[in-house]
Image (cartoon, grey):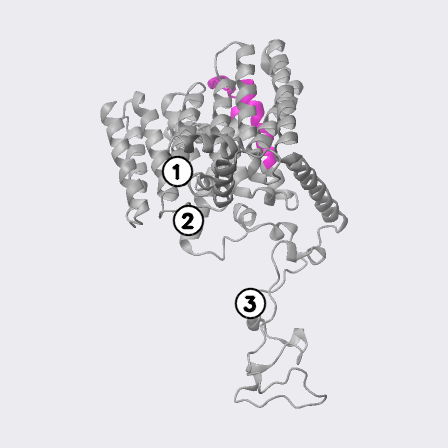
Amino acid sequence: MKKAATFVVLLAILVGVGSVNLMTAVPYIVIATVVAITVLVALDKVNERYYPVYIYGLALVLLWQTSMLSSYVVGADIHGELFAANKAIVGGWDFGWTYVNNTSLVLGGITPLIAKLGIDPLWQFKALYPAIFALVPVILYYAYKKMMNEKKAYFAALFFMTVPVFFVEIVGIVKSMVAEVFLALMILFMVSSLKDWQRALGIGVTAILAAVCHYTVGILTIIYLVGSFVVLLIGIKWLRGRRIALAYYGVAIVVILTSSYLWFSIVGDGDMLKYVERIGRMEVAAINYHLSTNTNASDINEATIVPEPKTPKAVTPKSETPKEPPPKAPPPKTSSPKSVTSETSLPKSAIPKSDISEPSLPKSKSYLHKQEPLIRVALGLDLVGVPIEGKVFRILQYLTQFLIVAGSVYLIPRRRSYSFTPEFVACMVPCFGLLGMCLFFPAFSSLINATRFYQACLFFLAPLLIVGTEQLINDSERLWRRYSANAQR
């Protein structure tokens, strides 16, 4: 254990110092370390007792290679978060301030408290909170281990933390980093062997803490729990007669909903509830508009999704071209008349396609081509136009997505081969529902963006990658043996 811990500490120091000083070798060191340790695990060269240590170390260096870049914070949301935290440090936490980041317990309460201990908020955001966030794969490992063996749990946790959004995007959202720790703890309670009321209590407390740390994670957690409760009501036989477990589960959900509503009614002057209501109205309006236009590409306002490029006009000196030329004035003479043809001098149909940077989408194109770029990537709609390295990355992602879907298909008839709890399996249903809405509902994915939806769903779907891989290998071996036996006859 000491050797593993020493290795992780030295690696973290190397990556942290190297990232602050912008050493280009850091990402290669991180990749090489992840690959090396994973190969050793696959070859049974690492003791299972050390898996959590290495998982934490790998997660930490993946996060620090991003968060520790330069001497300032890195990310999009994190700048507004630092502003809110510094305001709370200087003047105290103003519960009535209607600012979205002011609703987070992390920024208004925890960060100022830690600052009083002498830790600058800047380095809390760059080093401390990523170090806390690195616990998420470790917690998930312990949760997955209760449903699978140690090695399978390692690979499931590894997949969760090597999806780029984990160490590229979420690491730049402090309130989400802390909230996801509580979401992971909720899953650990969900699969634990505690008494029903203890599990329900743990689920309730951790879900509430996730909500007060980050509204987005809180809303997603509520969707998971409510959706899974409905699934369990429909398929109550999964509880094997333990109706009391479902009752505790329902009480926990009611407490979570009530507590979250009260919190967001008070903090931030209730602006978050109004914001959620506005989002709901906007989404309903987008769906109604989409249905009313019968999904014709020409009827959808592209400016709200991808602005349509206009035909570039030729650049000519102002002295040669008056602002409002007189009627019937001849065009200016140049050595290359065709190159200075303006948009108004010829009909649009006469302009060669080579002069247009990107033509508008033809009516034959489906609504899916209007989705945000990441959704089009997920569907493979841009596969032809990307370079070879882009194709390789996309194909790898498609393979993992296929294995997740395959795992879900295999899990139901072969669930006795694993120890997935009914609540955990039921949470997979709203996860697939959310991902389906990202793909096919207009503008739904842009509420938080597609990558964050995917990462949040991986809390429950990551083990399906292992299930799908294992079962496909088993089926392939079975078919090969059958084929070999028939060939020998």
Pair 1/2: label in front: 1
Q: CA distance from mark 3 to mark 2?
A: 26 Å
- Camera-side residue: 204 or 77? 77
- The answer to whether the residue labelled 1 contacts the one labelled 3, judged by CB atoms less than 8 Å apart, is no
Mark 3 / mark 2, whichever is N-terminal = 3
What residue lies at 27% left-to-right and 26% top-to-bottom? 46
- Camera-side residue: 150 or 268? 268
Which label number is shown at residue 120? Answer: 1
Give the image location of residue 86, x and y in percent.
48, 40
Q: CA distance from mark 1 to mark 3?
A: 48 Å
Q: Which residue corresponds to mark 3?
A: 357
Q: How many marks?
A: 3
Badge 3 density bin: few <14, some 14–19, many ≥20, Cα 10 Å: few
Callout 2 amino acid: Val
Callout 3 amino acid: Ser
Q: Which residues are magenta?
A: 411-434
Give the image location of residue 460, x and y in percent.
51, 28
Mark 1 / mark 3, whichever is N-terminal = 1
Res. 406 visible in picture: no
* Residue 422 shown in magenta: yes
Identify whether 47 is placed above or below 95.
Answer: above
Report the residue that reaches farthest toward the right. Answer: 292
Q: Which residue corresponds to mark 2?
A: 392
Horizontal side of 247 relative to 386 (left or right) equals: right
Callout 1 amino acid: Asp
